[in-house]
Image: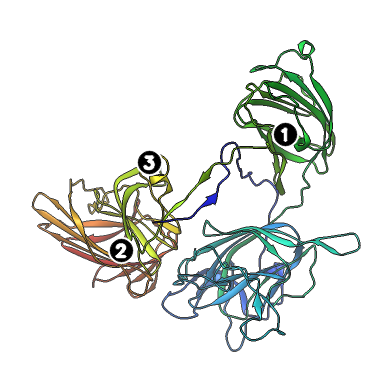
Amino acid sequence: MIQIRKSIWVSLAFSFSCLSLQAQTRLSLSSFEGNNGSWSEVAKVWTDPLISKNLSSEGQGSIILNNPDKKRPGTDIISKEKFGDAEVTLVYMMAPGSNSGIYLQGRYEVQLLDSWLVINPKAGDNGGIYERWDESKPEGQKGYQGYAPRQNASKAPGTWQTLNIKFKAPRFSANGEKIENAKIESVTLNGILIHQNVILFGPTRGALSDGEVSEGPIRIQGDHGPVAIKSLEVKRYDTPAPEFSEISYKVFPGSYTELPAENTLKESSSGKISDFNEFVAGLTSASLSKFEGVVSVKKAGNYTFRMSVPNGSGAIRIGTNSDPLVLKGGNILVEKSLQAGEIPFVIWVSKPTDWTTQGFLLTGSADGMWEREYSYPSGMPERMTDPILVDMKETPVLRSFIELPSRKKISHGISVSSQKGAHYSYDLNANQLLRVWRGMFLDATPMWNDRGNGISRPLGTVTELNEGTSLFYSSAFSPVQLEWKPKGYQVLADGDLRFFSSHETQELKDRIQIMTDGKGLNREIELTGNSTPMMVRVAPSQQLFQVAENLYWLEESGLFLKINQAGQKPLQGADGLFLPITTSLSYSLLF
């Protein structure tokens, strides 16, 4: 095992995601300039992931496709609309071996690349923040300030991938001088966080201009190979955060779990502050504090304020309201539709014991607004935890509880790694392949930290295959309930295990092997003592598209199914995708 130490703010610190109410700009091909004919809009796109730089398409629709050829060489397209602070969500498909990129403000590139089999990604890999460039430097040193993804969260070419970028534009003074660098708050690729808080000191290589701006276009690279875009949405972050001002306070000694009538209180101190973090109660014993002032709202909208008091309770009112305030512990939530202007506020903070932390936590958020922290407790306890990441070289196979998306727990689970970066989990009781993923292996922190709960979690881009369902089904797609008795497993090689089970006179051998090229896994099931035709549930997908002989694309799951036995064809049922078996079955999953 390898333990990596990092700080995790827990206790009363919290993060929230707001429902998106602000209109998002959905870009279509007509939203861009620069198309010389290689870009079009089609109804469907697919590819054989084993054929280099090829995307096939049909029909007319809303999918933006760049398919350059000798007559129509690819070009970059540039949005007509310009954006500043924004959240960009791109759903895209790479052709095998292809290369593209999305430039924020036409200047800062996040790479789009077929990085399917990369183990240790670099800045030029899928999701990487591309390098800046200096031609005056010696060879090998021209590129600098590029940022590699934390791990390779890419899927196979020919599957839809989702890239989400939260971007802050550079800030400029009134005379045009840059006073704050551009920043990428976060990048997630296929649901995996791959960048966080990355400062962009200047444009990356190939930018529209070396100069920086407060607003610029979205640019999609089109001269390096085929790429398809299922959707591209941009949400502006142009809502200014409200400001708390004219803050006055009063401190009353005593321990309170309920708010008394204010005229019965005797204050020990009072004053004015410009910021909540300046507040000092002046008491080491229990106290009750009241804050009053105004909230300056620059843009009308729906705002959410969240407050908590470490080891205490609090109450908050934004605006005029005659309802009595009530002290509460834990997270205190106020959701308010506010008009622009000066709005009164009242905050109460109760510290009922003499050892509680000074101050309180207060944040504000709204759609199209960066979350703002207004107050943070001084000396707030910071709990340190050591994430326990499983080193697949030292522990290539791990037995543990496995938690499924439904929160059901598999008690006899096993996870298997491979040096090729592809991994899987298996239910030893049900003889079922549970999930596959690519990237890092396992986080065993829940399993071993503190008292532990026995659960390990996959770290990469996960595809769920089965949630405790039966392995075998009848021809009517009904589960065949057989009480299999696990007989153990045999480790054959890296990522290659054979599992054994029995039921009365039947014997089951189930071999699952990560491919030597790392593109997926092979599965071979041998069933002796059985004469009844059955089916094996392979995946939950309903949409099935044949891309080549014996090769099918499971669009919903983002998998490719390869049939390895002559004469077999997948069958679709209400509960997923199935393959027939009587005595043997062999198939592969590419992911």
Is the residue marked by circle 2 packed among few (<14), some (14-19), or many (20+) residues within 10 Å?
A: some
Quarter residue 313 falls in: top right
Determine which residue is flagged by label 3: 453
Q: Is residue 231 left or right of residue 575?
A: right
Instruction: Identify the residue under disc 1.
Output: 336
User: Badge 3, how many Cα within 10 Å: few under 14, some, many 20+?
Assistant: some
In the rendered structure, the answer to whether residue 389 lies left or right of residue 373 reads: left
Asked if 469 appears above or below 170 in the picture, the reply is above
Q: Earlier in the sequence, mark 2 or mark 1?
A: 1
- Could you tell whether 74 is left or right of 580 in the image? right
Q: Name the amino acid type tagged 3.
A: Asn
Circles 1 and 3: CB atoms closer than 8 Å: no
Marks 2 and 1, how far apart at CA: 53 Å
**Secondary structure state at the residue bearing disc 2:** loop
Q: Is residue 420 above or below residue 374?
A: below
Q: Which residue is mark 2?
A: 570
- Mark 1 falls on what kind of element? strand
Identified by mark 2, the residue type is: Pro
Mark closest to the chain's N terminus, 3 or 2: 3
Kindly give the residue lying farthest to the bottom in the view shown: 70
Residue toward you, 572 or 205: 205
Residue 489 occupies quadrant: bottom left
Q: Position of residue 225 (x, y in %)?
A: 57, 79
Q: Amino acid at mark 1?
A: Lys
Q: Are marks 2 and 1 in contact (CB under 8 Å)?
A: no
Q: Position of residue 178 (x, y in %)?
A: 82, 64
Measure how far apart labels 3 and 2 are at the Cα level.
38 Å
Q: Nearer the viewer, mark 2 or mark 1?
A: 1
